[in-house]
Amino acid sequence: MTASPPSPDEAARPLRAAARELADVAVVLREASVHATAALADGSVLGALPRAPAVGGRAHRALLRAVTDRGGLGHAVAGGRLGTLGARLGGMAGAESLAVRVMTTSLRLRITAVTLENPELAEDPMVRRLNEAVAADRDIESARALCALVRDRGAARALTAIAPIFGEILALRALLDQNPLNDNTAWLIASGVRTASADPITGLSNRAIAVLDVGEGAARRADPSPAEAALLSGGGSLLDFLANLAAIGPTGRALVQAVRGPDGVERYVVQAPGMKIGKPDDESPGDLLGAFSSTLLDSAPYSRSLVRAIDDFGVPAGAEIALIGHSAGGAAIMSLAQDPAFCARYTVTHAVAVGSPVDFKRPASPHTWVASVTNQHDIIPSLDGQGAGTCFDLHPGWYVVDYTDPTHLFPACHSVEHYAANLAHDLPEARAEIDRNLEPYRGRVTRSQVYRLYDRPPYPDGFPFLTVPTHQVETAGGPVELPVRCHEGGVLTAYFAADAEAAAELLGAAAPGRPVQVGGRALVAIHAFENRRTSLGGYREVDLGVVVHDPWRPRPLQIWRDIFRPAEHRRSGTRFVDTVLSTDAACAAAREIWGHAAGTAPLYVRVGGRSARVAAGTPDDVIMTLHGPLGPWFPTMDRDLVVYSHRDGTALRSCVESWGRGRAHPLPRARLTAGTSDHPLARHLRDLGLDGARPLLCLTAPAHQTRRGAGVPVLTG
Amino acid sequence: MPADSTALLAHAHTLGADADALAECAVRLRDLAARLRAHDAAPPWLYETMNAHITACVVASTDLAEAAARMRNYADLVR
């Protein structure tokens, strides 16, 4: 009878053990190098030379030989200032030490072991070419092999192909290249001592980036959308928790739930999703910077904000908590599990990290049951330096599921949905084991709360510009808080030269009624507001106004000086002639509070970008459009607007105060079209001769805040 | 005993211990190479590499032992 061949895992095991032993030997060699360098650089050794120059000189030469002998320790200057400098110079010259050579052999054995377990790595000629070039320290060939791989497969498939040996390839490259800055992090990856503290390609310190992520952490209750709420699970299994993480998604939020276990005891589950998609550094602790800091630091804003959420949820001291996290959320919950103060306050019974770089996290309590689930083709868990190829048993007490599946394209295989599907269909034993351990939490969810997490406590909404005293007035459209406050909005103002007589006729006899003129033509403005979030709800607004002089003392020669004054000192203004709004509530406020000739109509206003996109009316009944490129611009402050209007025969003056960055477009190429509609705005534009006109100047503010108080009656007589 | 001599002796002691540790490393590597030789999955390049490492460890151990001895002599003279 012949013995069956060993499984790939069994065949790889001795190679991993050998890699581990080689790494240990490399560490001993490096320590010896550090000691010899320290002796060589010691001032007292040099200082004693005059007392025994011949013997001292021989001792020095012996030391020098020990740290430079190519047949022995190699270029082994290491440790301390002199050692660091010498190592860097040696690294730049391509001189290697015996310690590095032995560590390189360890890494190559690790790659061999992973290749045995993932035969596709050996079968893939392009990966094999890269692997061989890296191991042979052929820089140009390595770069060519990587470029060929990316060109042939695309970045995602190339990363997927090398994911199981990603850390080893980076460490090998870093140990063997001529960049001395990445040697330390390569050593950390290869020796498994600590988390990789720098980018293994450039040597740029990850810790330096991580410490930029500052803040005490904060959490505010946030209601999930109805669709999200419907997806939140009421059960307490691993798949339920992963479904919850998928439901709230990587949006900078977290979920805390109370669960009544089978024994009737209420326990708590904290669920932390992965990195927030969007800006690398915003107010969320789960952004890219937060993912770095959660992985590298013991305590970071993400974990601190989770503590705030747990506090707010009212988890009693001593209560049992299970922590579940995906990706950066897994690193954050492990930071909580290793925080002695947190663990003294609560009983952290379980920590489950899915697709997370948590190899160097250690729970503070030996009673915390830890599970780590990682797909070998997911690069994210290996960002701390240890991936599928690791030869170190970094956490013997953990339940580790490190698997590979046939559909493992990165980054798709990193998603929580993919992990949930793998656990549901491909890893039933692992799922059952984790669920068995989570048994105390398998009960009815009695309370759920989603939290939005912040690096630091957020400002009150609208602070400081919109935190002003308010009062309420009644209108036909319902109560309106004044000033009307727009938290998120944009505006486009287009100035035109219009027929002066038509403008004067439009204003009539009522004051202020003298139009400002430019070259004998009246200055007329179209204001298009995209008010995305206001105290009146979201709405859009288009106004036609004529720029008018100081109602009391028109000064045509000094008008420009007045126009550029701050609004509180400005006497000239814009008299609104027509106002079109998209909602009834905003229309009622415009009519009843400011006395505008306002009506509702379908409006499209898009502010931002390089072109104007404004349309009022329907395709069958077009009131006006303002479309086209806005041309070059220069930055300016968003300008306050002084508005004159009439209500019940009284002239009112009001201000639209703005806060935001603006742009001035001195050469706009957009064109205004007056529709054929019988709407007053269309009619007035035609009367003013503006159909087909191009603006003289456009001002835009894509993101601003505004507030508009009640109109103040002004005496004009 | 003057401070210089104490420092020299400390270095000599450390270097001597490191020389022993490296000799032990050479033995470990030799055992490892022997174990891997019986393993089918071991890559063919491994044996030559291991032999080079073993030789280098022995040479490095000798270098350090000599440095330790010379440092000890040096310490005796400056005492």
Image (spheres, rainbow, N blue to C red):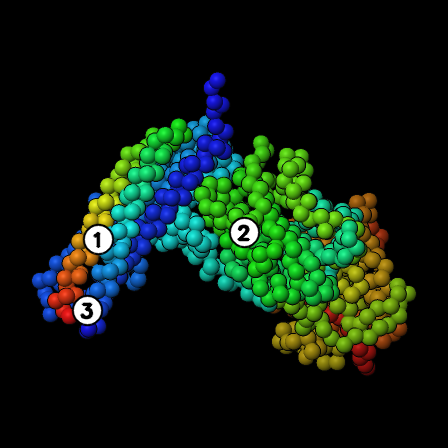
Task: Give the residue type that dot 2 points to.
Answer: Val
Horizontal arrangement in the rendering, residue A666 relative to residue A469 (left or right)? left
C-alpha span from label 2 to label 3:
48 Å
Instruction: Give the labeled residue for mark 3.
Output: B5
Task: Give the residue type that dot 1 points to.
Answer: Leu
Q: Are marks 2 and 1 on the same chain?
A: no
Instruction: Give the labeled residue for mark 1.
Output: B64
Instruction: Give the labeled residue for mark 2.
Output: A358
Q: Is residue A291 above or below residue A127?
A: below
Disc 3 crowd rating (10 Å Cα; few below 14, some 14-19, many 20+) is many
Horizontal arrangement in the rendering, residue A289 relative to residue A44 (left or right)? right
State which quarter of the image contains the C terminus of chain B.
bottom left
SS of the residue under disc 2: loop
Chain name for mark 2: A
SS of the residue under disc 3: helix
Residue A683 locus on image (x, y percent): 81, 56
Instruction: Give the residue furthest to the left.
Output: A54
Q: In the image, which is nearer the foreground, mark 2 or mark 3?
A: 3
- Name which residue lies at 27% across and 41% down: B54
C-alpha span from label 2 to label 1:
39 Å
Identify the image quadrant of residue A569.
Answer: bottom right
